[in-house]
């Protein structure tokens, strides 16, 4: 029993906590972003992490988003195949993708293996992401759009 548990409460069910924690790591969100994106209060999510009892729609949504990020972890993943007839992403398309995914400029730059300032200068200068980076970001954005909040 921890100091957070009350006498007579059921023991902690770690499966929900592990699922939420792993999903946050894969997606790249802090708990506050998960709360905003899901519509559930962060205190409620924290309680699920400690005690379990997560609702099924939330669980399914979180698993689906995690699966998107597991499938496309980096622009260099084998599952990211550049191609198609979409043009590379410019400044505004990258910003749109960041908003849909819920990443900051710093998080995106880190995932791309680039310094945040260098990425911003590159995009502000009129350059675009390369084809593979663009396709990766589009795949993640599409995954988030296809899995709306519970």
Image (cartoon, rainbow, N blue to C red):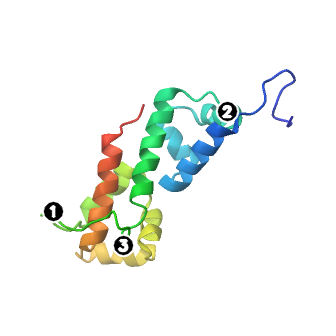
Q: Is residue 145 above or below residue 103?
A: above
| Residue located 51% across and 34% down the image | 59
Q: Mark 3 packing: few (<14 Cα in 10 Å), some, or many (20+)?
A: some
Circle 1 sits in a helix, a strand or a loop, which is it? loop
Q: Quadrant of residue 109?
A: bottom left
Circle 3 sits in a helix, a strand or a loop, which is it? helix
Q: Is residue 39 visible?
A: no
Q: Nearer the viewer, mark 3 or mark 2?
A: 2
Q: Is residue 3 above or below residue 106?
A: above
What residue is shown with label 2?
Answer: 47
Of callouts 3 and 2, the N-terminal one: 2
As rendered, which of 35 and 47 lies closer to the eye? 47
| Residue located 70% across and 34% down the image | 13
What residue is shown with label 1?
Answer: 86
Of callouts 1 and 2, the N-terminal one: 2
Alpha carbons under labels 1 and 2: distance apart: 43 Å
What residue is shown with label 3?
Answer: 120
Circle 2 sits in a helix, a strand or a loop, which is it? helix
| Residue located 12% across and 64% down the image | 85
| Residue located 87% across and 23% down the image | 7
């Amino acid at each position: 029993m921890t100091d957070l548990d009350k006498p007579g409460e059921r023991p902690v069910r770690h499966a929900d906590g592990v699922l939420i924690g792993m999903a946050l790591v894969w997606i790249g969100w802090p708990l506050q972003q998960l709360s905003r994106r899901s519509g559930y209060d962060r205190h409620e999510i924290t309680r699920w992490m400690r005690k379990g009892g997560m609702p099924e729609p939330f669980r399914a949504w979180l698993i689906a988003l995690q699966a998107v990020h597991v499938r496309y972890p980096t622009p260099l993943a084998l599952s990211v195949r550049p191609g198609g007839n979409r043009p590379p992403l410019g400044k505004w398309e990258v910003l749109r993708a960041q908003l849909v995914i819920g990443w900051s400029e710093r998080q995106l730059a880190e995932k791309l293996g680039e310094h945040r300032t260098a990425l911003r200068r590159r995009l502000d200068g009129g350059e675009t992401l390369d084809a593979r980076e663009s396709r990766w970001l589009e795949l993640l954005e599409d995954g988030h759009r296809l899995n709306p909040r519970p």
